[in-house]
Amino acid sequence: MTASHLHPPGAMSGELNVPMGSPAPGGSERCPDGGGMDYRDWVRRSYLELVSSNHHSVQALSWRKLYLSRAKLKASSRTSALLSGFAMVAMVEVELEMQYKYPPALLIAFSVCTTVLVAVHLFALLISTCILPNVEAVSNIHNLNSVSESPHERMHHYIELAWGFSTALGILLFLVEVMLLCWMKFLPVDSGGPQRGAACCPPGGGANATEPAEAPARHSGWNAAMASTIIMAPVAVIFVVFTIHFYRSLVRHKTERHHQEIEELHKIKIQLDGHERGLMTV
């Protein structure tokens, strides 16, 4: 008795309608007396193996995206919480010299930079806090088909927005915040303001009494603030250049990976078309 007599035509057509992701039947392909498979059984088994492997590769890609989204959300939440906390402490703990007249532009820049920095990081923290629990709940389920329940695909733009705010824009604003904080802290040191100049000059000095207030001497505090600016400006430029280079390299890598996946899918399509033509001829 051959293998073709063991399987009626209805059973053969029913086995072809196997859902995606189901394992290819192995034991039913062989004869119970130890004989081999005929050509139709071999073509059907090869077709099911190709479909199953393609489905599992798509699921693996979805799981990789889920783990990447979860890692981005975790990094964004930690970085945003840390840097926003530092910015708030810096704004609260900074001690302004009441006897020194700060430049209005410096005060406005420090206030605006601190406010924008905290707002950007809190917005990234809000997105991470809202999306991360839903992604974590799905990632802890050990089931391949549960990846479709995660909202990381639908919320992809929000995840990238939180990642960009927390890493790129947030860190750049933090560098500017450090530079402005150095100016706020060191500029009054040894500045020789109007009060100190009036105390140092003899009474009745006339025009000589206004010389320390009018002469913008580069004192030690000004030099310290300028040194921090000289150091921080190249660091900010390097940071911007590295960020642009990193994202361009990442986009190039993703593009190459997509091209490879498209080529693999094209090869699978050619193989499946060949198997389908083989089934039709048989």
Image: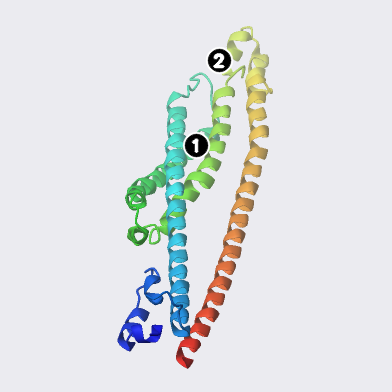
The disc at residue 195 is 2
SS state under label 2: helix
Tell me: residue 188, above or below residue 128.
above
* Amino acid identity at mark 2: Gln
Where is residue 250 drawn, in percent x and y?
Answer: 59, 56
Where is residue 198 drawn, in percent x and y?
Answer: 59, 12
Residue under label 1: 108
Tell me: residue 154, above or below residue 195.
below
Total number of numbered labels? 2
Q: Quadrant of the N terminus?
A: bottom left
Where is residue 252 drawn, in percent x and y?
Answer: 61, 60
**Mark 2 / mark 1, whichever is N-terminal:** 1
Could you classify mark 2 by the number of other residues whose Cα lies within 10 Å: few (under 14), some (14-19), or many (20 or more)? few
Q: Looking at the image, which is closer to me, 70 or 185?
A: 70
Q: Is residue 11 visible?
A: yes
- Outermost residue, top side: 202
Which of the 4 image quadrants contains residue 62?
bottom left
Q: Is residue 161 visible?
A: no
- Looking at the image, which residue is at 64% across and 38% down? 235
- Looking at the image, which residue is at 58% across and 13% down? 196
* Amino acid identity at mark 1: Ile
- Looking at the image, which residue is at 33% across and 53% down? 138
Tell me: residue 254, above or below residue 105.
below
Could you classify mark 1 by the number of other residues whose Cα lies within 10 Å: few (under 14), some (14-19), or many (20 or more)? few
- Looking at the image, which residue is at 68% across and 15% down? 208
